[in-house]
Image (cartoon, rainbow, N blue to C red):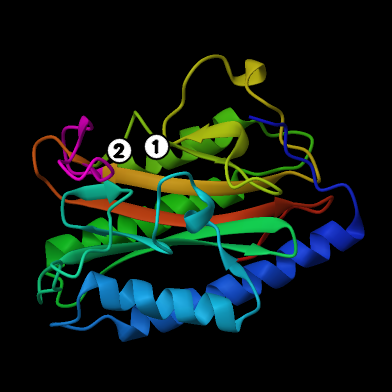
Amino acid sequence: MKKINIKTDEEFQIMVEGGKLLNKIKKELVNFVKVGVNAKEVDDLAEKLILESGARSSFKMVPNYSWSTCINVNSGVVHGIPHKSIVFKEDDLISIDLGLFYKGFHTDTSVSLCLNPTEEVKKFLEAGKEAFKTAVKAIIPNRSYIYDISYAIEETLVKHGLTPILDLTGHGIGKELHEAPFVPCFADGIRIETPKIVPGMALAIEVMYTIDDPDIVKAKDGWTLETRDGKIAGLFEDTIIVTEKGSLIIT
């Protein structure tokens, strides 16, 4: 992985523009999701909207992956293939993950939702959103480390009785979809030995979590990673640019 670095004001503006486009597309996909809609229909709409925006699908640039989104349902954590056979039901927990390649730079975002959530699922989803917010607050340019982001995510999830996924991480992003540094959902190693957060960094911060056992397994489709115990998983992700004053969520 290459070290990420936004070197110019022009590159910064391109990523901000791309992030706005991706955020708009994400919102349209969320509004499109209804009982009876299938995952392929969501993916088809995503592809249409991405092309209409003048961009390309980041995910279709991943070797051997042929879709614009990853759609995960219930126990699915990441990389779920948006098959036509996945028809959304009222109580499904649905995660939509998509990326956009605009004028040479990638942005990446994910959101989890439930069409008719129980109180338990509402609290589960709110905890993931809270963990993401605390992760962003932990970013202090030239003073924070990646460890601080990871610690904030883990601390928030554990406070709500939830478990971060251990085998997957967020990542740097820019000219490549996946760049350095890795951004775990849990604190690991020695704080000052993790990368320092400095202006110019672009990070795709991902909150990936479940109810109990963090172990994941690969499904028979060869892509989908799901919880080993079959319990629900959540995924919240946005692309962030670190500035001299703090951080900017661009998706």
Left or right: 23 in relation to 233: right
Left or right: 95 in relation to 132: left
* Quarter of the image with the C terminus in it: bottom right
Answer whether residue 215 is magenta in the image: yes
* Residue 158: mark in rendering: 2
Left or right: 36 in relation to 112: left
Residue at 67%, 26% in the rendered image: 195
Residue at 13%, 82% in the rendered image: 36
Using the rendered view, name the quadrant where residue 225 is placed. top left
The relative height of residue 96 versus residue 247 in the rendered view (above or below) is: below
Magenta segment boundaries in residue numbering: 210-225
* Residue 155: mark in rendering: 1
Where is residue 2 shown, x and y percent of the image?
A: 70, 31
The chief SS type of the magenta part is: loop
Seen from the viewer's position, the closer of residues 248 and 58 is 58
Q: Count neighbours of disc 2 (C-alpha within 10 A) and say few if under 14, some if 14 to 19, many if 20 or more.
A: some
Is disc 1 placed on a helix, strand or loop?
helix
The relative height of residue 182 versus residue 63 in the rendered view (above or below) is: above
Where is residue 192 shown, x and y percent of the image?
A: 66, 18
Distance from the alpha carbon under mark 1 to that under mark 2 = 5 Å
Seen from the viewer's position, the closer of residues 142 and 201 is 201
* Residue 92: mark in rendering: none
The relative height of residue 241 versus residue 216 in the rendered view (above or below) is: below
Seen from the viewer's position, the closer of residues 59 and 144 is 59
Using the rendered view, name the quadrant where residue 14 is placed. bottom right
